[in-house]
């Protein structure tokens, strides 16, 4: 069975606290305080996205808002909303970790360029 990674567990650099998700060091995207990695569900090898957001300099109020948003995203089940699997805070590394469906084929801006009727301009909504 192909799990998307070498079956040698040394290729995983981190696991979530439950051991369900394993993260590789392959970066799919990111920004100043966020990095998205390729990851896998240990049980069945399904690939997922593992987003780490550094929360070291986030105020307690901002952190609570991020956690509330993560709880909301996890509860949403809709056809046009990205599937959100899990989240947790790594207190030692000061990271908020989010596990979602993986989309790696094209960025949103690339998609919009290809499909002329689609825009990322949300003014007026």
Image (cartoon, rainbow, N blue to C red):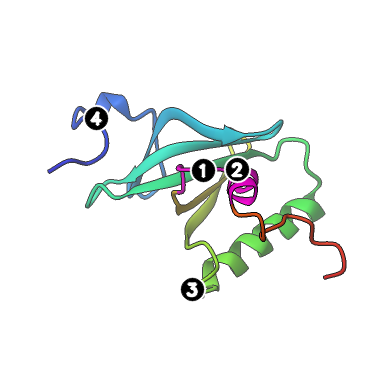
Provide the secondary structure element on which disc 3 rests: loop
Spatial separation of the CA atoms under disc 4 and disc 1: 28 Å
The quadrant of the rendering that contains the C terminus is: bottom right
Residue, disc 1: 106
Question: Considering only order in the chain, which callout, 3 or 1, is on the residue closer to the N terminus?
Answer: 3
Q: Farthest residue to the right: give it.
A: 124
Please rate how many residues cluster around mark 4, counting C-alpha atoms within 10 Å: few if below 14, some from 14 to 19, many from 20.
few
Residue under numbered circle 4:
9
Q: Secondary structure at mark 1?
A: loop
Q: Label 1 vs label 3: CA separation? A: 19 Å
Q: Nearer the viewer, mark 2 or mark 4?
A: 2
On whether residue 28 falls in the magenta region, the answer is no
Element type at marker 2? helix
Answer with mark 4 or mark 1, whichever residue precedes in sequence: 4
In the rendered image, residue 108 lying in the magenta stretch gets the answer yes
Q: Which residues are magenta?
A: 103-114
Badge 3, how many Cα within 10 Å: few under 14, some, many 20+?
few
Question: Answer yes or no: do the residues labelled 1 and 3 have beta carbons within 8 Å?
Answer: no
């Amino acid at each position: 069975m192909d799990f998307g990674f070498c079956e040698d567990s040394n290729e995983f650099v981190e696991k979530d606290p439950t051991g369900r998700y394993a993260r590789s060091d392959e970066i799919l995207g990111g920004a100043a305080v966020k990095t998205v990695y390729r990851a896998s569900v240990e049980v069945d090898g399904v690939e997922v996205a593992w987003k780490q957001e550094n929360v070291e300099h986030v105020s307690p109020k901002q952190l609570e808002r991020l956690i509330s948003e993560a709880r909301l995203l996890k509860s949403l089940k809709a056809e046009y909303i990205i599937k959100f699997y899990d989240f947790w805070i790594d207190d030692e590394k000061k990271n908020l970790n989010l596990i979602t469906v993986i989309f790696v084929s094209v960025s949103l801006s690339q998609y919009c360029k290809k499909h002329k009727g689609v825009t990322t301009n949300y003014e007026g909504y």
